[in-house]
Image (cartoon, grey):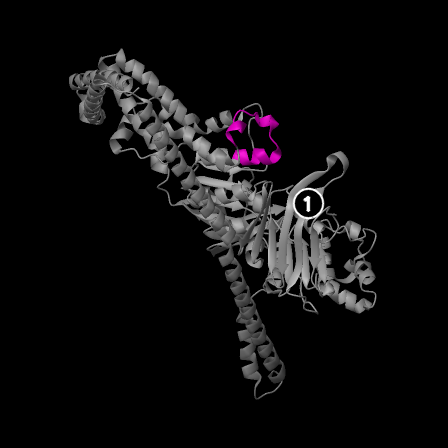
Amino acid sequence: MKISQISFTINDIKILKRLSAIYEYTENAKTKGMNRLVLINIEHIYKYFNGEPLLKDLSFTLNNNETVGLIGKNGCGKSTLLKILMGQEEFDKAPDGKGSVTVSDCAIGYLEQNSGLDSSSTVIDEMNHAFDKLFEVKKRMDELTQCMTSSSGDQLELAAEEYSTLSSYFEAHDGYNTDFKIKLVLNGMGFSDLSYDREISSLSGGERTRLAIAKLLLEQPELLILDEPTNHLDFKTLIWLEDYLKSYRGAIIIVSHDRYFLDKICTRICEIENGQLCSYRGSYSDYVILKEQKNARLLKEYEAQQKEIADLTEYIAKNKVRASSAKMAKSREKMLERIDRIEKPQILDKAPRIKLEYSIEPTKEVVQIVNCPLVVGSGNSKKTLIESLNLCVRRGEHVGIIGENGVGKTSVLKLIQGEIEHASGNIVWGNNVKKAYFDQEHSSLNPHDTAIEAVGKRYPKMSDNEIRRALASVLFHGEDVFKPIAVLSGGERAKLSFAIMALQKANLLILDEPTNHIDLATKEVLEQSLEEYTGTMILVSHDRYLLNKTVSRIVEITPEGVNFYDGGFDLYTQTIAERERHEQERAAELKREKEREEYNLTKQKQYRSKQQRADDAKRRQRIAELERQIESIDEEITMLEEEISQPEVAADFKLMSEKCSRLEQLKTESEQKMSEWAQLEG
């Protein structure tokens, strides 16, 4: 990585020209670094595979300090575009020879699926590598310090010049706080102090991904490219990463399916669709609105032109053979030929229709779980996940259940439905409750059945045409209805389950990770259906965008217990942040109280004679005097270092020697007084 964000003066750059080649990159970083506006400029590029265009006439510009979310269906060319940007793949030019990719000479951090970490290294060693350049600068500064104490003449002059420049650079890049930065980022990414000495080889794939992100954040490149960074991150880490990236100084390109993540941090959404890239200003939610408006406008323009063409064609056909109107018909023919035909807009693949209704109202309290333990497994593998669960779900509520993997979210759904027994407590159902269960494993579907059989066996009174219409609503057309469930993709099985669920007319929906494996269009249709659904819902999901749009209450399951929060996911995160702030303030206050108590106790236990008090007063007086002297010396040292860096001083050898000698004298005097001050303070 190159070091960037350097703020050298013109005089500093002149001095840098005299330094060794190892530090020449600093001048380039100033002239080519953060002051640039456009980091990436792509114009009219193509990419062909087996003669077919994956990317067609694609253009894209990335400015500094932008955060761009790159989205599109799987296989649309997102990863290919990133590889082109990184120079890992070549692009194809347009038929007329146009096409270019310009990437500024800036520091780039790229997170791929393969983390690229050294497996034999430890966590802390790998993080320290993010500051290799700073450590090189510090090492050189230490060498120059030794050199200046034993040199004179031109050698002393050059050493002083180089030291002044490197010291300014080191401080500007916060070189004295690398340990703090490492701890901040590692803690945020879910690594405790105990993890620092672990070898990379002992980490799981998810832990390596988190560590790779942490290293990139510490390197602080001018351009950060993240490919699916939210995989393997829990809610707490996601929230921390979102806050960190929102204040990141630099440009970011993110490929992600996590719409909540994109919504929180992106300033622009770029979608690759049908080989072309379309840009939308704002967050993901803004993109959804703007995309809908654009599609409506394109369709309206296309339909208006088609009507105009039809009208002209009809007029020509009617009047071409008539002598009285043949001339007008000929004129309309020319008009028709001149029309710049608009292609039929290829609006998103046809989305499924999921209409969720219910036929009967339940009682006010739909289901109550009272003092029920949640125990999973059997025999020696039996494990208690929740000691006592209490939950009341009322009519019309949309309850979202969240928590880390393994805490028992799916098991809670099974407990509610009686699939897991409870040794004590009670589960009370209201009257007229009719439930439908979406199982993320789709275990209720017989793999040997076809799609049409799966519906027909559940609803034997439905005709084949009625079943076909139900299946067509989730995009099973023609021969697709005869596909065995065993060969269906995860997304197709989910859509089939949605069709069955819609036919149940249930007033209670119990959903376990319903957005897994489904495409973006289906997610958005499902979200709208659940948002508009007036019945009762219990939803387990890690999809924060879905939770934020559809739930009215959050139930958080943790190893310590169950917590309840009113509102959607945004309100949940705000409540958590507020609670953590109060806890930190309370902890700080308790610490201060403890320190005051210990101080008062110590004061009470101490017996101090008159002579001791007098000696203590003298000691405090000497400490204050030393602090004033040290401050005065430090001010003179700072002034001398600034003078030494001036070209006119560097050009006067005698004056340079005098100032360097005085500088060393002051540093020695400062160290002596600091030593005395430390002894008195101790």
Report the quarter where the N terminus lies: top left
Q: Quadrant of residue 353?
A: bottom right
**Main SS type for the magenta part?**
helix
Left or right relative to 518: residue 174? left
Is residue 104 visible to us here? no
Report the quarter where the C terminus lies: top left
Which amino acid is tagged 1?
Leu
Left or right relative to 326: residue 62? left
Is residue 185 visible to us here? yes
Left or right relative to 218: residue 596? left
| Residue topped by disc 1 | 374
* Residue 148: image location, x then y, percent: 27, 15
Read off the magenta span: 192-212
Farthest bottom residue in view:
324
Residue sitting nearer the eye, 206 or 623: 623
Height in image: 327 above or below 543?
below
For image coordinates 57% across by 42% down, the residue present is 234
Residue sitting nearer the eye, 460 or 418: 418
* Residue 254: image location, x then y, percent: 52, 45
Helix, strand, or loop for circle 1?
Answer: strand
- Indicate yes or no whether the magenta region holds residue 210: yes
For image coordinates 80% across by 64% down, the residue present is 459
Count of numbered tags: 1
